[in-house]
Image (cartoon, helix red, strand yellow):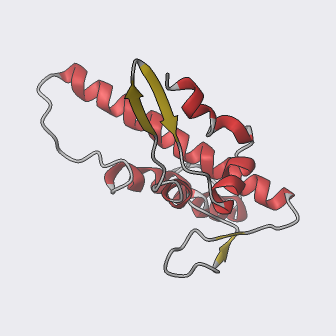
Amino acid sequence: MLLNAPKSHLSVEQAVLTYRDEWIAERGFHRLKGASLSIAPMFVQRDDQITGLINLLSLALRLLTIIEFVVRRQLTVHEVNSLAGLYPEHPKKRTAQPTAERLLRAFSNITLTIIEARGQRFGYVPPLNPLQQEIISLLGLPPDIYSNLVDNSS
């Protein structure tokens, strides 16, 4: 954002529109400071650990942003332009602007169970519910990406 731009660079309308878009950058900082990524004080002793942590968290922030962007874009393209089931307290509530955190929370019940018996490994993943299947589809991922977890676990 240009804070001290001369009038010749920005019209009043452009300045207002630029200011209104500022929330996008602020939202990223909020995620870094909040529960999503939690760049809170922690026990790190060396500068390279701090640098590594910040790099990892900024990568996670980019991933959250991409997930949101892709799903929201796909929702505008699809006939059904909203998603239901992301709010456990209101299962029928629909949204066209789902957050990455809510999308990922829809997968919080996923488990991969691996049992080793007689030298063989057996894996099990519970079936995806319709909401999880829809999210995977909106992300443009192949439907078998989840079921392949069992195949790749051995």
Q: Which residue is painted at 54% across and 40% down in the image?
A: 63
> Which residue is painted at 40% across and 33% down in the image?
115
| Residue 8 is at least partly visible in this image | no
Seen from the viewer's position, the closer of residues 126 and 33 is 126
Q: Position of residue 41 (x, y in %)?
A: 17, 45
Q: Position of residue 125 (x, y in %)?
A: 53, 44
Residue under the point 50% across and 26% down: 153
Q: Position of residue 19 (x, y in %)?
A: 58, 61
Tell me: 39 left or right of 92: left
Q: Quadrant of residue 152?
A: top right
Height in image: 24 above or below 125?
A: below
Report whether 84 appears left or right of 29: right
Residue 79 pos. (x, y %) = 88, 65
**Who is closer to the viewer here, 104 or 55?**
104
* In the displayed structure image, the side of residue 144 where residue 106 appears, left or right: left
The residue that appears at 74% across and 69% down in the rendered structure is: 82
Please say if 93 is above or below 97.
Answer: below
- In the image, residue 73 sits, relative to residue 113, either above or below, namely below
How many marks the image carries: the answer is: 0
* Residue 2 visible at all: yes
